[in-house]
Each structure stands twice: as C-alpha cells, then as structure tokens.
Amino acid sequence: MEKKAKLSRLMKLSWAIQKAKCSTRAKALQSAWAIFSNEDITVFYLTKKLNHHKPVNEKTLNQMGLFTR
C-alpha cells in the first residue's frame, strides 16, 4: 500500500505542476520526481530562503517535511 500511496502523491503533484506551469506531462512528472527524491534538501532550502531574518533551530528543521506520511 505504501508504494501505491507514494505513486498517487507523485501523480497529484505532477498534475498540479503541469497545470500551474503549462508544461508537458513528461516535464511535470520529472519535476515532481525531483521534488520527492530531494525532499529533505528542498525543506532545508525553502526554510532558509523564507526565514532568513529569523533562523530556525536544527531540532525543528529535522521535524519538518514537505509531505505527510
């Protein structure tokens, strides 16, 4: 069931990317896969980018995630 749920989240994200960016299906799926496979790096990057004036401590940063499991 875990694999099916992961694929479902991947497809939903790729559809959202395709709709928002008006890109091809292959490009949207590739972008969604990159986001999923680099989730921990993406969370770190977005947190640092959006909270540059007040840093987030490491304990809180380790508890964050893009997607609920």
Image: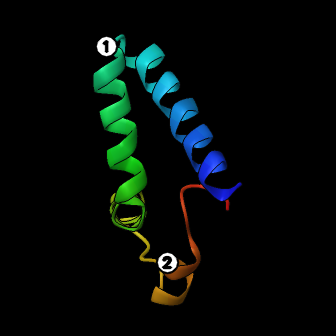
Point 56% across, 81% down: residue: 60
**Residue 17, percent from left and from top:** 43, 25
**Residue 25, percent from left and from top:** 36, 17
Type of amino acid at the residue the image marks with label 1: Thr
N-terminal of the two: label 2 or label 1?
A: 1
In the drawing, does residue 63 fall left or right of residue 49? right
Point 56% across, 70% down: residue: 64
- The residue that mark 2 highlights is 61
Q: Nearer the viewer, residue 65 or 31?
A: 31
- The residue that mark 1 highlights is 24
Disc 2 versus disc 1: nearer the observer: 1
Q: Nearer the viewer, residue 67 or 48?
A: 67
- Placement of 25 over or under 46, stated as above or below: above
**Residue 63, percent from left and from top:** 58, 78
Q: Nearer the viewer, residue 13 or 20?
A: 13
For residue 22, which quarter of the picture? top left
Type of amino acid at the residue the image marks with label 2: Leu
Quadrant of the drawing holding the N terminus: bottom right
For residue 48, which quarter of the picture? bottom left
- Placement of 34 over or under 60, stated as above or below: above
Point 64% across, 46% down: residue: 4
**Residue 66, percent from left and from top:** 54, 56
Q: Secondary structure at mark 1?
A: loop
For residue 7, which quarter of the picture? top right
Query: Callout 1: few (<14), some (14-19), or many (20+) C-alpha neighbours within 10 Å?
Result: few
- Placement of 27 over or under 30, stated as above or below: above
In the drawing, does residue 35 fall left or right of residue 19? left
Find the distance from the CA under tag 2 to the CA under tag 1: 33 Å
- Placement of 41 over or under 33, stated as above or below: below
Q: Secondary structure at mark 2?
A: helix
Point 51% across, 22% down: residue: 15
Query: Callout 2: few (<14), some (14-19), or many (20+) C-alpha neighbours within 10 Å?
Result: some
